[in-house]
Amino acid sequence: MAVDQRFEVRQETAWCPGCGNFGIVRAVAKALNGLGLDPSQVLFVSGIGQAGKLPHYVSGNVLNTLHGRTLPTATGAKLANGDLTVIAVGGDGDGYAEGGNHFLHAIRKNVNITYIVHDNQVFGLTKGQASPRSDPGMVTGTTPLGVYNEPFNPLATAMTLNAGFVARGYAGDQEHLARIIQAAIQHEGFALVDVLQPCVTFNRINTYQWYRDRVYDLDQEEAYDRTDRQAAWKKSWEWGERIPIGIFYQVKRPTLADHYSDILDVPLVRQELDPGAVEEILSEFRIG
Amino acid sequence: MQTLNIKIGGQAGQGLVSIGTILIRAATQEGWHLFAHQDYESRIRGGHNFIQIRLADRPVASWENDLDVLVALDEATITRELGEVKPGGVVIYDPDVLGQDAKTLVEKPNCIGLPFARIAEELGQPKIMANSVAAGAVWALLSEEIAVLHETLALMFAEKGEAIVQGNQSVASAGFARVRELTRERAVPAKPQGSEPRLVLRGNDALPLGALAAGVKFMSAYPMTPSTGVTEFISEHGRIARVIMEQAEDEIAAINMAIGASFAGVRAMTATSGGGFALMTEALSFAGSAEIPIVVIDAMRPGPSTGLPTRTEQGDLRCAVAMSFGDFPRAVLAPGDVEEAFYLMAHAFNLAEEYQMPVVVLSDQHLADSYVTVPPFDLSRIEIKRGRVVSCAEAGPDYLRYRCTDDGISPRLYPGFGDGLVVTAGDEHGEDGHLIEDAETRRRMMEKRMAKQRLVEENALDPVLCGADEPELMLIGFGSTKGAVAEAVEILNSQGCRAQGVHLPQVFPLPKSLAALLQKPARKFIVEANYSGQLEDLIASRFAWKPDGSIRRYDGRPMNAKFILDRLPGGVCHGS
């Protein structure tokens, strides 16, 4: 197999025909093939929901964990073996509702992983309830009078916490999304890629057509400076007639592994286990 | 046996732990064996706390009620605890902190007023050295010589410089001299024999030490009393042992982080208490389904809910055995003392990795916070068994994470260690780890996982016995009641009652060998620190058996021999 085709996308999936997930999984494979990685070096950690199934449909190691728990699990795996390229995957319900607290703290820790959020603004697998990303007024199974909670803004939240890499992609533009995912993987530190993803079954508002009419690439804005956090934060609130996609903000910060650099000169998983190593510590408790 | 019970009472923040630590170290150096337990409130300053040290000329594993020495740093120690002093016992109090009523109570010949802080200040030293004044005062009741105490102070304060060492030594001498002078008539106990080296440590030291010896490489935890000591221990010593301890945002994150690390191929653990343990419910089930090894220490405190956060109970047993949804294999260990705590941690990691499942180690506040002297640990007894792990070559490119085998144990491959891909899921999965929906695969996978539970049961740790071989009375317990039961058994035997203690270091699955013990003709009592008899339920449901009686404590205070003996019905033994 050609080196740049090692990541394959499985044909048979449990996704609805026309689902935005197909665009995302193809963009993921494209990005990884472009980076020349081998599937055995890549670990996907995913949650529960239709998005959480993505790792089962593309080449790589898989840790398909619990609903909302992708980020702490991915953090532990990355600290144990820093040689792995770790990509966390989940939906907006998984990451911003069930896993909301973990989202905040994974950013604070700045663990060197990529986090791809399939953001379709609705709960798909439980068949169409409101998500933290649903637009106000959207009628769903749990909001018959329309959504009334303020929508969660993942990009603004991430930037408030000084995330080092904050981006938004669109499932309908695979080329662009693949480029963003590549940049996210190459970024040293926590990289958020929120992906606008049409849900063809349960979200009749934010459709392919709806997005096509609105999204534009930030790179087309000449004056845009992705190191200016204030400007990027302001940009993350643009939602309506025009919706920006691309890398909003990027800055280098010390990663979680940097804090443990004296321990991690060899990955934890390759260190010898030796009971005798506690001798020195035991001596503190020894008397006589 | 010569034993001496010393209780130091005062407010939180007054330096009880400092005085206790000085005395514990010095007494151990002098050759004493000891057991010291701590009682403290859920607050940072004020209230009333104590540390109680039992010295003995041979190893001891529990505490006694009657005091030989009571040191009062606050008024409450006098008003509440004066009655615990045995005839001939000595009370040393600080007159500067007593109100009028308490002052009346100490107008007795055996009560010695010693203004600890004032003495330190009069000698030109800071008030905080009151602790060393008090330590010196107590030392005067233990020894005619102050040298060993001075040596201890020198070691403990060496890092703070010569002036601090000398200051502490001079105020300790002052406290020592005052009490020596006033108790000239009183004989000090015979100097204990034996000067072999010892360790003096708490359960919260022994558990993490055991984990480090076992090769733990990753820990994540969220602080919660009384487990926090374990977490801080690994944080403090992690860099020497090359271990990461990452504080998590909550217990859910803590266990999931550890599971992630374990999946990647390192020994990983978390530590928590009651409420935090409950938050780990979901992840425990995930580890069971995904077959990822994980060790969880649950340091129990009285529940329900926040309960009594700083006190002791064994009320999480049912939870540890049954917690979470669905059926999956697991083991629950319950070390009874500091030595067992150390060695069982290595066993916990071996079990977790050999059977690829969660293992819960139950501790409690009494085990966690009590100091005891033990012989140095034998590291050659620590065996690291990582279970069935395949190399890159063995795995090959077609590696199946959940390959069905005769015993249900599928060889592990660490991700990134071969061409084969490691696919793991908490959803029901096939041998390749990908998601399935069909009934046949589901049935096979359930049977594969649960086959491991049978193996765990076959290899369960046997009960640890003490006392008479052919008993007429049997006391059965688990965890930190071990010392109390052993001492009760010893006392009963000395009174002519053939008693046997049965300690269960593994409470789930229960060892089959327990069945034979339960068949013995003795009258059997279950001793446990919870209201509903959780151990009793567990044994009863496993072996269709009922005890002759139950001894339960659920006031948040630790069990001891007296508590047990006071509750044994009369005539239960021909000798009693």
Image: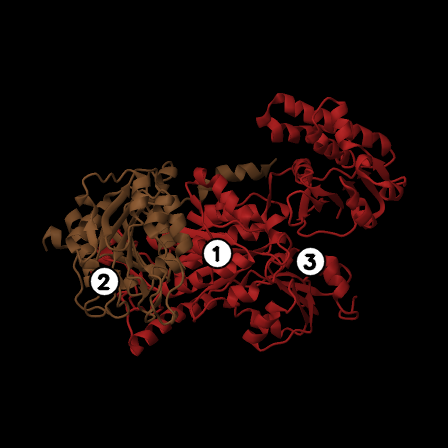
Residue in the image at 51% along x and 51% along y: B343
Chain B pictured colour: red
Asked whether disc 3 touches disc 1, contact meaning CB atoms under 8 Å apart, the reply is no
Quarter holding the C terminus of chain A is: top right
Between label 2 and label 1, give the one nearer the viewer: 2
Vertical relation: B518 (above or below) B139: below
A264 or B28: nearer the viewer = A264
Which residue does the numbered mark 2 point to in the structure image?
A21
Q: Position of residue B346 (x, y in %)?
A: 47, 52
Residue denoted by label 1? B296
Identity of the amino acid at label 2?
Asn
Which structural element holds mark 3?
A: loop
Shade of chain A as shown in the rendered figure: brown
Q: Secondary structure at mark 1?
A: strand
The location of residue B419, given as percent across then percent down, is 21, 54
Please give the residue where the numbered disc 3 appears in the rendered image: B559
